[in-house]
Amino acid sequence: MAVIRLSGPDARSITKKIFRSRQPLSHRKAVIGELIDRNGFIDTAISTFFAAPDSYTGEDLVEISLHGNPYLCDLVIDACNEFGAHLAGPGEFTQRAFLNGKMDLSQAEGVADLIYSSSRAAQKISANLLKGSFGREIKRLKSQLVEALSIIELEMDFMDEEIDHTPLEKLQNKIAAIIKKTDGLIKSYEVGKILREGIFCPIIGPPNSGKSSLFNAFLQEERVIVSPRPGTTRDYIEEVVRIGNYQIRFMDTAGLRKSTDEIESRGIQKTRVLMLSANTILYVIDSSKPLKGLPDLPSHLLKKTLFILNKSDLTDSKNLRRLNEIFGKYPHLSCSALKNEGVHRIAKTIIEQLEAKIHNFGDTHIISRQRHKNALISTKKFLKLAWRNLHNKSAPEIIAIDLREALGGLDIILGKTENEDILNHIFSHFCIGK
Ligand SMILES: Nc1nc2c(ncn2[C@@H]2O[C@H](COP(=O)(O)OP(=O)(O)OP(=O)(O)O)[C@@H](O)[C@H]2O)c(=O)[nH]1
Ligand SMILES: [Mg+2]
């Protein structure tokens, strides 16, 4: 089936021209009838009318269900356009819903995220946006801020009078508490981004260690070429695997070595860049070969590296002892990509590491959009200023300005102060018709 959706004050009158039914269109009633254009009958269809303001967009809205044939849909859309309708832009229905106050901007973003979510974790985080629980959290922070602001404004009004000036310390504590909440949200972005986009795991290591074999084993198919010749993989290739509630974005890369081959060198260069943005680096080592020592990795990369001691089917006990000496202190797992042994354990470990991080956040909200993070960073900056100015006993007028700026950041999340360019940017990432 296909659904054609019309929104706006003329939605009903246009529908009446292209849809004939015995029963009239009435609010929330599905009505059966015939779609027609100037050449006559197109299809049998069911139309449901939603009267403003009780519709998705807050405007009069009609949903026409017909057979899911793109050609039939084109005929109906052409007929609608003839009577004054126009095609919706990406996200235009949701944009109208936002502009008509049916949802705040974070909820509108939740609609887009939910549509594109492809794991349970991503679905859950976007559902929190869509259903407004994140928006409510921001509104709670806002009302705490407004309370602080009203205390300061009261101070301004009665500065010279003999009233009980609320102890500054109390206000400072109030602001410190809001800073703490804001900071928790900002920190959650690291995990939120992973939940939304998947855990990014490039597979790196020396040539011929079995990176491509491991990549294929994760995918359970022969996705990339494997060969005994070092330097087989020159560019990188990404595939997403869904495991349980999460997505892992595995990436097969060119081996790390000095190369005189121009294409391979570029591949190696790219690998270095990928390592920076990785969530977990899988560093594959051929454990059947004698090893000198720990691979030379800077500490910020070492921190997120899981060493994979591959080719366990070829390792002898002497090798194993040596490997234990080298990797004992660092996260490591052994496997045989060739025999598909220990591969699942690797994926499980990657997910356990993420779950430990999620657990740290307890019941704090997890944010997953850069826009929200930036707005919260701005709020935190001004809250800290306010706190310091209170501490320094600055004039209440100055503190009031800081607090208003901090409020501004929260309003950006809810879409109260967004300019048109930013709105257009957000909605342009929706699919057409949503
Ligand atoms: N015995 C054994 N051989 C393996 C294992 N994993 C990979 N190999 C073999 O090692 C060779 C290299 O494997 P690749 O997966 O191409 O290695 P790579 O790290 O991608 O190599 P480059 O792309 O050239 O850097 C192939 O002949 C594989 O069959 C394993 O677990 N055990
Ligand atoms: Mg390879």
Image: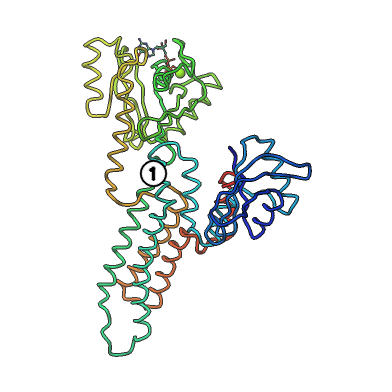
Q: Looking at the image, which residue is at 68% across and 48% down?
A: 19
Residue 125 left/right relative to 161: right
The residue singled out by tag 1 in the image is 124
Q: Is residue 310 above or below residue 61?
A: above
Quarter of the rendering containing residue 345? top left
User: At 78% across and 45% down in the image, what residue appears?
Assistant: 38
Q: Nearer the viewer, residue 431 or 407?
A: 431
Which x, y percent locates residue 251?
45, 27
Where the N terminus falls, by quadrant? top right
| Residue under the point 66% across and 36% down | 70
Q: Amino acid at mark 1?
A: Lys
In the image, residue 153 above or below residue 19: below
| Nearer-the-camera pick, 106 or 402 | 106
Q: Residue at x 31, y 52 (%)?
A: 364
- Residue 117's spot in the image, x, y percent? 46, 40
When asked about the image quadrant of residue 168, the answer is bottom left
